[in-house]
């Protein structure tokens, strides 16, 4: 039987605690963000209808987290999922997956990727100095977006633009991951100076979700209450919420209070068992 929402939330809370302890131990700076920060600020925990955990890091800390995670330092219970570790994964950020569990959209059950219960680790980047570096960042994010979404388009059987068709056809699979690693190097820029930084979950520099760099000031980080514990977030977390959600204190209409769609959640059963039941 699929798991109830509260059981899912408590499982994800346990994951967050493990990640927070791991980051603190290894001097990796994380920030509770997106819906998880909104839940902390408005509900002192999960948004009652939310079904995932979101944190973010700047490029330097993100690379450290991914490197250590892939090396197995998070332990055997977790799988660090991105284009390096799961070839057909189709998001530009990293998801931490809990082995032996299930969190899969019903219409994606046929996809050949890890679908354990997950939390999102997003990257906050800044614009680099210099015209050439800025151009490289724009080109890299565009190429990265197309190459990463290659399997998303296949799974969903979506039509591709000519640009997508050409790039996905001329880059052989053996070179796809090395090229993505190169693109990521130019796309994810450590926050050191400048005026703006932005969330790389959209991989769209034409219309990014931008913040003043002060929001990511590591010296101003603060802890916020979430469920039965406290976790690091932005010192200016209210400003962050205003940028992302506007009037964040106001509850959405009842018909908009839902999770991420028709998803099979099971904290006791591996996603592969569900895949075996496909006709």
Image (cartoon, rainbow, N blue to C red):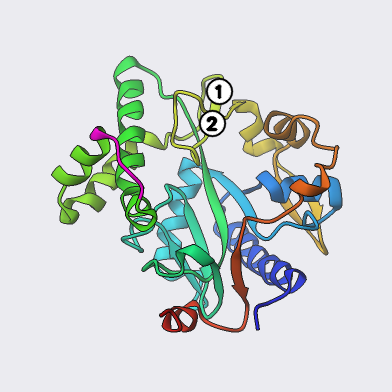
Image height of 198 relative to 130, above or below: below
Residue drawn at (44%, 56%), measured in percent from left and top?
Answer: 66
Residue at image mark 1: 196
Residue drawn at (49%, 77%), measured in percent from left and top?
Answer: 271
Q: CB of mark 1 within 8 Å of CB of mark 2?
A: yes
Can I make out residue 223 in this image? Answer: no
Can I make out residue 101 in this image? Answer: yes
Residue drawn at (63%, 67%), measured in percent from left and top?
Answer: 15
Residue drawn at (35%, 27%), measured in percent from left and top?
Answer: 138
Q: Position of residue 91 (x, y in %)?
A: 43, 50
In the displayed image of the protein, which residue is found farthest to the front? 279
* Magenta-colored stretch includes residue 160: yes
What stretch of residues is rendered in magenta? 158-162
Q: Main secondary structure of the magenta part?
A: loop
Q: Position of residue 237 (x, y in %)?
A: 74, 37
Image height of 252 relative to 39, above or below: above
Q: Position of residue 239 (x, y in %)?
A: 74, 29
Quarter of the image where the N terminus is located? bottom right
- Dot 2: within a 10 Å radius of its alpha carbon, few (fewer than 14), some, or many (20 or more) residues? many
Q: Secondary structure at mark 2?
A: strand
Q: Secondary structure at mark 1?
A: strand
- Residue 173 lies left or right of residue 24; in this view the side is left
Front residue (pair 250, 278): 278
Quarter of the image where the C terminus is located? bottom left
Residue at image mark 2: 198
């Amino acid at each position: 039987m699929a798991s109830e929402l509260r059981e899912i939330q408590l499982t994800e809370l346990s994951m967050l605690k493990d990640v927070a302890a791991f980051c603190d131990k290894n001097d990796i700076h994380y920030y509770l963000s997106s819906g998880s920060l909104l839940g902390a600020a408005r509900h002192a925990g999960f948004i009652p209808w939310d079904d995932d955990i979101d944190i973010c890091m700047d490029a330097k800390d993100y690379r450290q987290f991914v490197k250590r995670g892939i090396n197995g330092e998070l332990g055997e219970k977790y799988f660090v999922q991105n284009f390096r570790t799961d070839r057909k994964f189709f998001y530009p950020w990293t998801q931490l997956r809990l082995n032996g569990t299930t969190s899969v959209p019903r219409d994606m059950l046929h996809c050949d990727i890890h679908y354990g219960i997950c939390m999102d680790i997003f990257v906050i980047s800044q614009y680099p100095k210099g015209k050439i570096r800025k151009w490289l960042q724009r080109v890299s994010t565009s190429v990265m977006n197309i190459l990463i979404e290659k399997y998303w388009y296949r799974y969903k059987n979506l039509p591709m633009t000519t640009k997508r068709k050409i790039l996905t056809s001329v880059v052989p699979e053996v070179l796809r991951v090395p090229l993505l690693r190169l693109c990521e190097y130019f796309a994810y820029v450590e926050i050191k100076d400048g005026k703006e930084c932005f969330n790389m979950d959209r991989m769209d520099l034409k219309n990014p979700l931008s913040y003043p760099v002060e929001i990511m000031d590591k010296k101003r980080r603060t802890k916020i209450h979430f469920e039965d514990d406290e976790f690091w977030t932005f010192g200016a977390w209210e400003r962050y919420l205003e940028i992302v959600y506007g009037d964040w204190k106001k509850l959405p209409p009842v018909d908009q209070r839902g999770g991420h769609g028709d998803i099979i959640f099971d904290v006791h059963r591996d996603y592969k068992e569900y895949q075996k039941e496909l006709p």
